[in-house]
Amino acid sequence: MLLVEDDANLRFGVAAALRAAGLAVDEAVDLPQADEALFVTAYDCVVFDRMLPAGDAVEYVEELRRSGRAVPVLFLTARDTVADRVEGFARGGDDYLVKPFAVPELVARVRSLCRRAPALTPPVLRVGDLEIDTARRRVRRGGVLLTLTSREFAVLEVLADRADQAVSRAELVERCWDEMAEHRSNVLEVLVSQLRRKLGAPPLLHTVRGTGYRLAVAEDPAP
């Protein structure tokens, strides 16, 4: 997701809370930075502070919608009148949260918007006896609840949404880590090893040589 907020302290706190909840967060401080980020990255959700140095984010989002961009948008703002909220929705916003706000509520709203993204993820993903509840963020295998870190859940969710397909290492890093993360060369491999151990046997998470990983009931036979 992308967070667009010019107040450094607020941006830092909100981004930290969202990352702690397992979301990959890129940051922008104004509309030109947001425009550049949206040009190069397909986000699942964008959170805009409404009043930014370069203008009202509502006007920018309205232009996004005219250009056919459907990324879900949440506005953060101190403008709390009914007319302000109606304008935000009428001009392209999907949600509207008034400052001051409770961070857990923001996290819940962002997760909800991410599930509305164009590549819609079903509320429950199943691969064999593995069940991933994307709304409650719970994973069970054979009915047994598994304890995963937020990052492990993020990687598993991407793989389950593309079950039986090879997902590249580059895509997994892009989807599950943000620009502030430490991208060590083996960070994904270490996480996958931990995830395999937690998923148990028979194996569901397979390496696709030269490409990435596949989540499937049975590994494809070697050519």
Image (cartoon, rainbow, N blue to C red):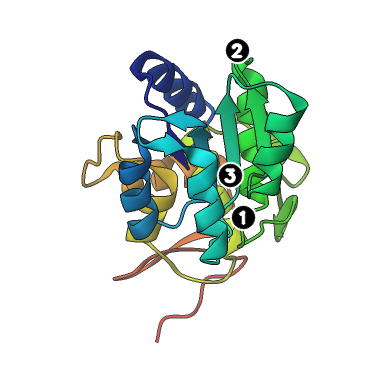
Q: Mark 1 and mark 3: span between their CA atoms?
A: 10 Å
Answer with left or right where residue 23 lies relative to residue 178: right
Quadrant for residue 77, please give it: top right
- Relative to 21, does residue 102 appear above or below in the rendering? above
Classify 150 as above or below 7.
Answer: below
Tell me what residue is drawn at x 51 percent, y 66 percent.
67
**Residue in front for this viewpoint, 19 or 62:** 62
- Where residue 51 appears, as percent x and y from the top left, is 47, 29
Q: Earlier in the sequence, mark 1 or mark 3?
A: 3
Callouts 2 and 1 close, C-beta under 8 Å? no
Which one is earlier in the sequence, the residue at label 2 or at label 1?
2
- Spatial distance from mark 2 to mark 1, Cα to Cα? 26 Å
First reached walking from the N terminus: tag 2 or tag 3? 3
Q: Identify the disc placed on residue 117.
A: 1
Give the mark toward the camera: 2 or 1: 2
Name which residue type carries label 3: Val
Q: Which mark is residue 100?
A: 2
Q: Type of residue at label 1? A: Ala
SS under mark 2: loop
- Residue for badge 3: 73
Could you say where residue 30 lies in the image, as x and y percent from the top left?
35, 35
